[in-house]
Amino acid sequence: MTETWMARALLAGTLLLLGFLLYPVLGLAPLFAIAFILWYPTRHGSDGRAVFAVVAFLFVAWILHQVRWVVYPLLAAMLIAYWLDPLVDRLERWKLPRALGALIALLPIAIFLAVAALVLIPTLVNQLEEITTKVPDAIAAIQSQLEPLRSRLELLSRGGQMPDWVQKGLEHVGSLLKAAIAGMSGLGKGVGKAIQLLGMLALVPVLAFYLLVDWDRIRDGLVGLVP
């Protein structure tokens, strides 16, 4: 029995390693194929159910990771709604409409998020300004490096020679181009992440409001799903 489990564990480890190595090229298809190979022989036993549960959990975790920019605001909104629901219930007992109570409860959080957005917006504007100022400078620097090289290449093309300094000059220009592209790419990624973060901050209070208005119904529906 021990040898059988060791052989299964070795086979599973080998197949999983192969799946992770093929993932960058073929995506999730090899991993699902390996999961099916591991699950099929034990599908009628407790081991099969355990393998299926693990694969299902990993698949759900992967889906959530892919849509994390939507999931994170939703989770934050659910936590806020859970936290503020007692306050909204108390305001509702004071004869306030639930929607108005949700707005009042969310007001401090909305103010905090607005302040955070005001802090992020100048950073985003500064990065955009940095991009717009660095692009012409990078182009001018590359042109200044290329101009003497171009004139020398014209002279060399007439004589049919290609000395070592030409090769070094070309390598230097290539490194300048790579550095310029990397710098612009880094700034662009920073701007993109800042925009995504602002979108998340704007989405959280909106989702929390709708969750708070129908929180009791949502909670009862989720409880009803539990067997």
Image: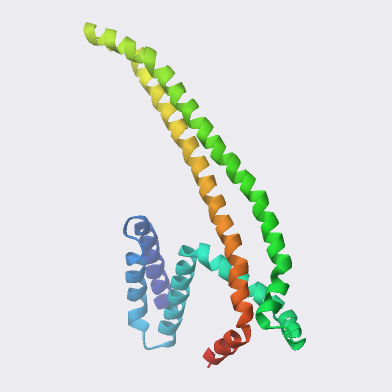
Q: Is residue 220 left or right of residue 108?
A: left
Task: Identify which residue is drawn at 67% across, 50% down.
Answer: 119
The spot of residue 185 in percent (x, y) is 47, 40
Examine the rendered structure and indicate whether residue 15 appears above or below residue 164: below
The spot of residue 64 in percent (x, y) is 49, 68
Can you tell which quarter of the image residue 7 is in? bottom left
Can you tell which quarter of the image residue 29 is in? bottom left
Examine the rendered structure and indicate whether residue 135 appears above or below residue 227: above
Examine the rendered structure and indicate whether residue 160 appears above or below residue 44: above
Examine the rendered structure and indicate whether residue 211 appears above or below residue 117: below
Task: Identify which residue is drawn at 34% across, 58% down.
Answer: 22
Q: Is residue 150 left or right of residue 180?
A: left
Task: Identify which residue is drawn at 71% across, 68% down.
Answer: 107
Task: Identify which residue is drawn at 62% across, 44% down.
Answer: 123
The spot of residue 44 in percent (x, y) is 37, 88
Query: Viewer-proximal residue, 98 or 120?
Result: 98
Q: Is residue 163 visible?
A: no
Q: Is residue 154 visible?
A: yes
Query: Viewer-proximal residue, 42 or 79?
Result: 79
Which quarter of the rendered picture does the N terminus lie within? Answer: bottom left
Can you tell which quarter of the image residue 117 is in? bottom right
